[in-house]
Image (cartoon, grey):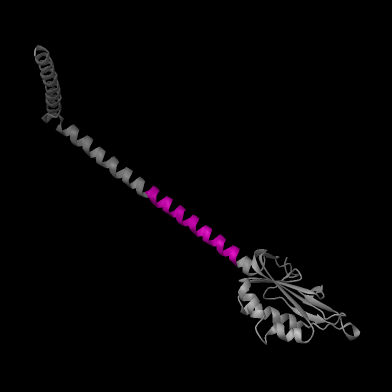
Amino acid sequence: MKGRQMWGMLGMLLLLGILLGVQFRVDRGVQAVGPENVGDMAVLLLRAEQQNHQLSGELATLKAQILRQDQGAVRYKDLVQQLDQARAEAGLTPVSGKGVEVTMAEPPGGPGTQGIFAIHDTDVLSILNELRAAGAYALSINGQRVVATTEVREAGTIFSINNTPSAPPFTIVALGNPTTLRQALLLRGGVVDTLQAVGIGIKIRTSQTLTVPAYQGADLP
């Protein structure tokens, strides 16, 4: 019982000491802010408000700068993506993806009389047009990228593709949905049926990994 009383007394003394300490701080604070110090406190308060206002302005300026930098970075990224897309659409960069590979071969025995090919430029163009209509987004013939200015011209015993001599067999690579491209070519009575009817060999191979090279025409610097 005496032990409990002792611990109780110690607890009360400790609590009393804490209360006295708090009261002492309060008294000192009240004394510090006497009538003679009100002016100083007002000046300090005004300075604090001015500094707070200044810091708030600096913070707003920094936020605006960061926002402009972020917007500039996003804009720059968008421009780079647009440029890359434009270069790809113009054929200035190689493109890889899934698609079909179409091989056009002469009939058995090779070119006919006087070396004239059975395959004509209109036959090649009919294949290209069918592939474009089916959604092909990149095309090449015998390693030559097909772009808006590409000409496929028959010139006697040779063909000219992007002003580059070429001859059958022709390998046409088209990037796009392989199933859609193949089905478009193999429509009953379509371009493949028409060409095969005159003896031109057509082979179609679908693939998940084909590459169309970049345009290397003579008109590039």
Q: In this view, does 217 lie to the left or right of 31?
A: right
Q: In this view, does 46 lie to the left or right of 63?
A: left
Q: Is residue 178 left or right of residue 59?
A: right
Residue shown at 14% from the left, 22% from the top: 18
Q: What stretch is highlighted in magenta?
A: 61-85
Residue 164, located in which quarter of the rendered image?
bottom right
169 part of magenta stretch: no
Q: Position of residue 123 (x, y in %)?
A: 74, 83
The count of marks equals 0
Q: Where is residue 26 in the image (x, y as percent from the top left)?
A: 13, 27
**Predominant SS of the magenta segment:** helix
- Is residue 93 visible from the viewing direction of this image? no
Please tell me which residue lies in front, 53 or 190: 190
Q: Where is residue 200 in the image (x, y as percent from the top left)?
A: 78, 82
Residue 29, located in which quarter of the rendered image?
top left
Image height of 148 relative to 78, above or below: below
- Is residue 14 visible from the viewing direction of this image? yes
Q: Quadrant of the C terminus?
A: bottom right
Residue 202, located in which quarter of the rendered image?
bottom right
65 part of magenta stretch: yes
Please tell me which residue lies in front, 90 or 128: 128
Quick one: which residue is furthest to the top in this view? 2
Quick one: which residue is furthest to the right in this view? 114
Image height of 158 relative to 92, above or below: below
Residue shown at 61% from the left, 71% from the top: 177
Q: Position of residue 63 (x, y in %)?
A: 38, 50
Q: In which quarter of the image is the N terminus?
A: top left
